[in-house]
Amino acid sequence: MFPLMVDMKNKKCVVAGGGSIALRKVRALLEADARITVISPEICPELEELERKGVIAAVKREVTDVDFEGAFFVVAATNNPQTNHTIASKLSDRMLVNDVSAIANGNCHVPASLQRGRLTLSVSTMGASPILARKIKESWAQEYEEDMEEYLDFLFNAREMIKKANLTPADKKGLLEEITDNKYRQSSLLRKDFQRIFQNF
Ligand SMILES: C[C@@]1(CC(=O)O)c2cc3[nH]c(cc4nc(cc5[nH]c(cc(n2)[C@H]1CCC(=O)O)[C@@](C)(CC(=O)O)[C@@H]5CCC(=O)O)C(CC(=O)O)=C4CCC(=O)O)c(CCC(=O)O)c3CC(=O)O
Ligand SMILES: NC(=O)C1=CN([C@@H]2O[C@H](COP(=O)(O)OP(=O)(O)OC[C@H]3O[C@@H](n4cnc5c(N)ncnc54)[C@H](O)[C@@H]3O)[C@@H](O)[C@H]2O)C=CC1
């Protein structure tokens, strides 16, 4: 397995199944601005609501092979493991496929993830214990609170300025190291000072 961040923006994603697990994957995909179609004979009220709002497309019937044409990512999330397996085995050589009922069938799976602006923390247990993955994520949530968002924006902007500055590579490296010191995470005053000093550089 190879951990990778994938740009899902406007990518065609097909979710087979309309239950609680399909809903969880759809919500995560919406965070990534994916273009989602849910196909399932029964569709839970929350997914129906998303369809009504025009946020996703939904088709009320069993999946067929043509539904997956041109898809970038497929989630096999029906409550029939055999159906999920059939979908995954047909598609996993051609596109990204996540079989929610068996890790070995697809070619990717969804880790537990925590987002703080530009910071993403993800953990997979390779299916050994999704609950442990969730608990690790929850412990990170204590350690990395909402303030990380602003700090990451600072790091991004400061790094852009450092990269463009007329400095030696060694000095740039020193500054890039310096801004990751915890004091900059803790003090917005120090962050502002750093940026002000650098702007006049
Ligand atoms: C392989 C994988 C495929 C995939 O879904 O991509 C997979 C597979 C399976 N999960 C099952 C069960 C549960 N999964 C959860 C929860 C989560 N599952 C997630 C991911 C993954 N689950 C992938 C591996 C990731 C990894 O190992 O790290 C999380 C991290 C992310 C997410 O789903 O978005 C999310 C935490 C959400 C969060 O972040 O808070 C809970 C607990 C709960 O719901 O609270 C239970 C019940 C307890 C239990 O069974 O352990 C079953 C048995 C189904 C059955 O009994 O029929 C299978 C199938 C099998 O066992 O092969
Ligand atoms: N990966 C994960 O995190 C977890 C995975 N699971 C697995 O996910 C499966 C689904 O769980 P839930 O969403 O809770 O089940 P659910 O019973 O709420 O929903 C299943 C959905 O699949 C649809 N469906 C059935 N046959 C279909 C077909 N041929 N084509 C399209 N849609 C079809 C049903 O209409 C229903 O909407 C479980 O059977 C289990 O194996 C369960 C818990 C966690």
Image (cartoon, helix red, strand yellow):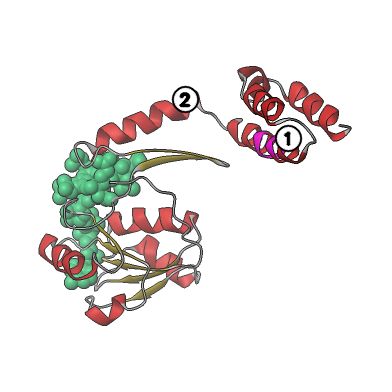
- Against 112, is 172 above or below? above
Q: Which residue is mark 2?
A: 142
Magenta residues, start to end: 155-159
Residue at the bottom extreme of this rendering? 66
**x, y percent for residue 81:** 13, 60
In this picture, residue 26 sits left or right of residue 194? left
Tell which of 160 and 102 is nearer to you. Answer: 160
Residue 131 figure quarter: top left
The disc label shown at residue 41, or none: none
In this picture, residue 71 sits left or right of residue 184? left
Report the amino acid beneath label 2.
Answer: Gln
Instruction: State the predominant SS element of the stretch in magenta.
Output: helix
Report the amino acid beneath label 1.
Answer: Ile
Circle 1 Cα neighbour tier, 10 Å, few/some/many (<14 / 14–19 / ≥20) = some
**x, y percent for residue 188:** 73, 25
- Against 197, is 6 above or below? below
* Nearer to us: label 2 or label 1: 1
The disc label shown at residue 162, or none: 1
Residue 135 figure quarter: top left
Q: For marks 2 and 1, give the CA distance.
A: 31 Å
What residue is drawn where x is 34% and y is 57%? 23
Q: Secondary structure at mark 1?
A: helix
